[in-house]
Image: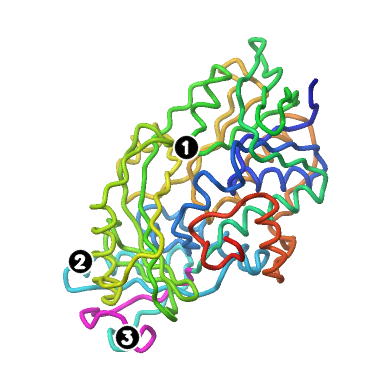
Amino acid sequence: MTIETDVLVVGGGATGAGIARDLALRGLDAVLVERDGLSSGTSSRSHGLLHSGARYAEADRAGAAECIEERRVLGEIAGACVRDTGGLFVSLPADDPAYFEEKLTACEEVGIPTEVIDGDEARAAVPGLSPAVERAMRVPDGVVYPSRLVAANAADAREHGATIHTHAPVEGIETDGDRVTGVRVGGAVGETVVADYVVNAAGAWAGRIAGMAGADVTMHPNRGVMVSVPYDDLGPVLNRCRVPSDGDIVVPHEGEVVLGTTSVDVDDPDEYPKPEWEVERTVEECSAMLPAVADADPLRTWWGIRPLYGPDEAERGGRGISRDFVLLDHADDGAENFATIVGGKLTTYRAMAEAAADLVCDRLGVAADCVTDERDLPGADDPARLDEFVAAFDASGPTDADVVAGG
């Protein structure tokens, strides 16, 4: 038995679900397969920061511009999948004043709205803020609830004709030397999918999927820890205004804050150490901004794996550089109907999906424009309906477990 479709999308995180939605809205028949529940890989294991682009402005102006645009789009279409909190980049005595000025100038050049306030104004906005904070920069950061975001994208894709299969791992890919001729899918599917085009959006596992088709995609998986602790009524996201390092982000939820994160390379995105020192360091560093978290008992601790592309990381050379997405056409690898998309950020998932869908439409000769930047996600104004989507697609995860009903 086989399943025939226009496009098979492998991977049910934000990017994969976004691709399925984009393709379905352009009128293509799409099938998405995910080995576990939706968003179970990386998307639902992040710190949940909806980037304004300010974090990357001085290092990558193009990437920062993409962030502020996608942050604007999500603010318009995603409803209760996101939360408009604003953000502060705070400067402590140990932080280089020149870096603050560099970031401020870069944000202004990119078009990211900013406002510089002194330490007293910052503490008026965040009463628990460290008395050591000297000044801060307001930016339009926000919070994203990834399980809702991914599930809503999948629900809209399904509503427009896509088929979404969870607990359906890819077990093998068949090629004839020129094309992918079939993808063997196990689990809940147990069939071979025959597609005109295949998009590999498997995140940190993309190298494994590509290898099944004879394509070489070198991934550079990198882990980071998040710690959620009780804290009432933090208003804005807090960012430490220094070169990106461990423990420099605090993300507000309703009665908790998420502290993040570390950056440690791993060999296997499924099996890797989870040392206590990462937790301790993250709490210690974040408490320099928000002292009360130092004595709070953790409610949840989780690690996420960043789906970084190896050659891109080697060229960019480090954590302080923005991580953009990479779209790889595997025609030269003997698979002309196969592409891989990796890297990027949760904030820019929709732009990643648009780029992948543009490539598919070009290869299949489909003349249809992207509309995902102007159409609201289903349930955007109804948190209960969004949480029903999360349950239906088994999309819950630790990032927003305190917010999503049944999470």
Please name which of the two marks, 2 or 3, marks the residue nearer to the observer.
3
Dot 2 amino acid type: Asp
* Quarter occupied by residue 102: bottom left
> Disc 2 or 1, which lies upstream in sequence?
2
Q: Is residue 358 in the magenta section?
A: no
Left or right: where does residue 259 sit relative to residue 152?
A: left
Q: Nearer the viewer, residue 220 or 258?
A: 258
Q: Which mark is residue 204?
A: 1
Look at mark 2 in the image and give the residue it sits on. Answer: 96
In the image, residue 242 sits, relative to residue 7, either above or below, namely below
- CA gap, disc 3 and disc 1: 39 Å
Sort mark 3 into few (<14), some (14-19) or many (20+) by Cα contacts within 10 Å.
some
Look at mark 3 in the image and give the residue it sits on. Answer: 123
Please name which of the two marks, 2 or 1, marks the residue nearer to the observer.
1
Residue beneath the point at 66% across and 55% down: 391
> Disc 2 or 3, which lies upstream in sequence?
2
Q: Are marks 2 and 3 in contact (CB under 8 Å)?
A: no
In the image, residue 405 sits, relative to residue 133, either above or below, namely above
Secondary structure of the residue carrying numbered label 1: helix
Instruction: State which region is magenta.
Output: 122-141
